[in-house]
Image (cartoon, helix red, strand yellow):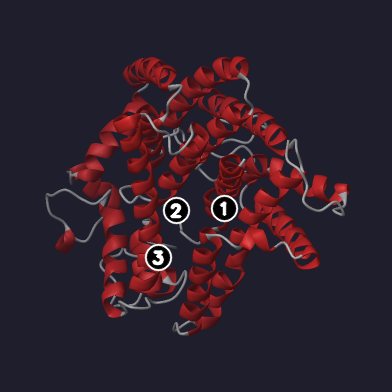
Amino acid sequence: MHVRTILNYNPIVINFSSILVYLIPLSLLTGPFFPDLSISLVSIIFLYYSFKYRLIKYFQNRFFYAFIIFYIYLIVNSIFSENFIYSLENSFFYFRFGIFSLSVWFLIDNNENFKNHFAIIFLITFFYAIFDGYYQYFFGKNLFGFGIEDNIRLSLSFNDKLILGGYLSRLFPILVASIIALNSNKLTLITLPLILILSDTLIYISGERTALGLMMLSTILIIILLSRYRIIRIITLVLSVSVIILLTHVDSDIRDRNINKTIEEFGFSETLRNNTNLDDKNVSERIYIFSPIHESHLRSAWKMFRDSPILGKGVNSFRIHCNEEKYNYDKHSCSTHPHHTYVQLLSETGLIGFIVISSLFVFLLFKLIHSFYLVIKNKTHLLNDYQILLIIAFILTLWPLFPTLNFFNNWINIIYFLPIGFYLHSLEENKKNVES
């Protein structure tokens, strides 16, 4: 049981903040507005309590130090960018994401049922998202009767964004960590295999290749690193692959999207020429980075980086500069972002921003490798399964080999920062256990 360090917190306010966090997985299905509103309210409440009760401990950790340095750099970067007003609009309120992570830690400390309630509501929400996804696949519309324009890719339940697969794959490790935290072996053994098979198959059906890649990556890490549940994951993976092979055989739309189109986009074909109308001067029979259109974004972003290698062109400014002649690669160069986290950081925040985030990725990867090494060498567990799953969620966020959403997008940042509060709390619990 978590003991409150201060007894003057208004329980109504604590419960209200907790409910807002419980509902974040559900609100993410609506798009960016409601989850962003939720984390903003939770952060404001936490900041009020922090100043009133001097809650210094939540700010005295390596995560917050690194975050605040990165945040200050984003502000400085925006001020010195060519479009400083637009850039500053995108960077100034970025601090709310870091504060939100600390808020979750604070709520876990001061609401003894927080993790249990969050896990149960999260589990229900995840099953709902899965059910709605299959409903879309079979009936061409979601549970509320809204049709989907794309006959293969699946949308969020309450939004037309075709990113249901990304929602499932990125939140999956956090969900499994939450289920483990319930300490209910019966519930885990019942729900986990079902979630695994249904999620694997639906992510494949969704037509999002990045989501499928992230799910495969988390699967590999789970099988290698977890001390428990790896057998369950292997069995469910075999079953999932069997179902996926069957679906690929019987459904030509899925086969075309996930196999034929992937082959076309990685290597040029006449079909691809007709679909994209790429400029002849940039067309050759070769392997592309993700796809010809993706590569056009990346090449345009690389030109921006070469022009401003230290500071970049400014936070979220790719969309502004990509049409300029000196950065343009072809007619497909321009987009809202380069669709790759590290290339976006290079083009918009320069080497400094890139080094901060890439160093974080290397640190987390080293932490997992070190933990695995200790288990192999002397059976010592540096991290428990709960912590490993949360780190896997971070690894998915920072993985460099797949296309990504806009690094500064509100919706994806909420997913990025959601597991951090849980992880920081677990580190504090470990420290308490060692001291006792």
Name the kind of residue labelled 3 in the image.
Val
- In the picture, the disc for residue 405 is 2
In the picture shown, does residue 197 fall above or below 294?
A: above
141 or 350, which lies in front?
A: 350
60 or 434, which lies in front?
A: 434
* First reached walking from the N terminus: tag 2 or tag 1: 2
What residue would you read off at disc 3? 356
**Residue 4, image x and y in percent?**
78, 47
Number of numbered markers: 3
Residue at position x 52%, y 34% from top?
386
Looking at the rendered structure, the secondary structure element under dot 2 is loop
**Picture quadrant of residue 422:** top right
**Residue 212, image x and y in percent?**
38, 35
Label 3 or label 1, whichever lies nearer to me, is 3
Q: Is residue 160 visible?
A: no
What residue would you read off at disc 1? 411
**Picture quadrant of residue 283:** bottom left
* First reached walking from the N terminus: tag 3 or tag 1: 3
Name the kind of residue labelled 2 in the image.
Leu
* Mark 1 burial class by Cα count in 10 Å: few <14, some 14-19, many 20+: many
